[in-house]
Image: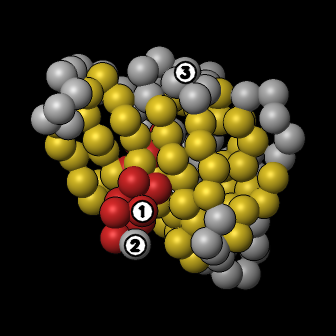
Amino acid sequence: MRTRKMLAAGCMTVAIATSGFASAHDVKAETVTKDFDAAIPNVPGKSLIAVEVDYAPGAASRPHTHAKSAFIYAYVIKGAIASKVNDGETRIYRAGESWSEPPGALHAISRNASKTRPAKLLAVFVVDTDDKALTTPLE
């Protein structure tokens, strides 16, 4: 269970860590906390990074892309998260549900699905060790 949480947190945190901006409705942005960052010893050049992303009620991440090398696993720890990746549909994931994102993904929507309750997810990234920008906000 702890490993699953670390994987999910790492993926999502990396994905959102560099976005740090609110949505167009002047809503607060997310808070990202890095939980884990280590080189993968049996996969040269790759690292595992886990982050927790906390969303206040109504909070959202600015649309962003992920590092071209990053494979991401996201796991909802608490609440509900609305997410849209690439050309997929917008979907709401609730506590206990997860999804993955391919390398170089466009994360058009990542927000708390509730305006009254907080939400939290774990994002786990498997990424090239030298990729420093896990996310890049769209302008």
Q: Are marks 2 and 1 in contact (CB under 8 Å)?
A: yes
In the picture, measured across the screen, residue 126 lies left or right of residue 43, that is right
- Read off the residue under disc 1: 4
Front residue of this view, candidates 109 and 102: 102
Q: Residue furthest right?
A: 89
Q: Position of residue 40 (x, y in %)?
A: 20, 36
- Res. 64 in view: yes
Q: Which mark is residue 1?
A: 2
Q: Which mark is residue 80?
A: none
In the picture, measured across the screen, residue 53 lies left or right of residue 80, that is left
Q: Residues within 10 Å of mark 2 (few under 14, many from 20)?
A: few
Give the mark nearer the N terminus: 1 vs 3. 1
The structure residue drawn at horizontal position 21% and vertical position 21%, both measured from the top left corner, is 45
The structure residue drawn at horizontal position 65% and vertical position 35%, both measured from the top left corner, is 107
Q: Nearer the viewer, mark 2 or mark 3?
A: 2
Q: Give, as a three-letter code, the residue at label 1.
A: Arg
Q: Residues within 10 Å of mark 1 (few under 14, many from 20)?
A: some
Front residue of this view, candidates 33 and 50: 50
Q: Give, as a three-letter code, the residue at label 2.
A: Met
Q: Position of residue 15 (x, y in %)?
A: 48, 40
Q: Residues within 10 Å of mark 3 (few under 14, many from 20)?
A: some
- Read off the residue under disc 3: 104
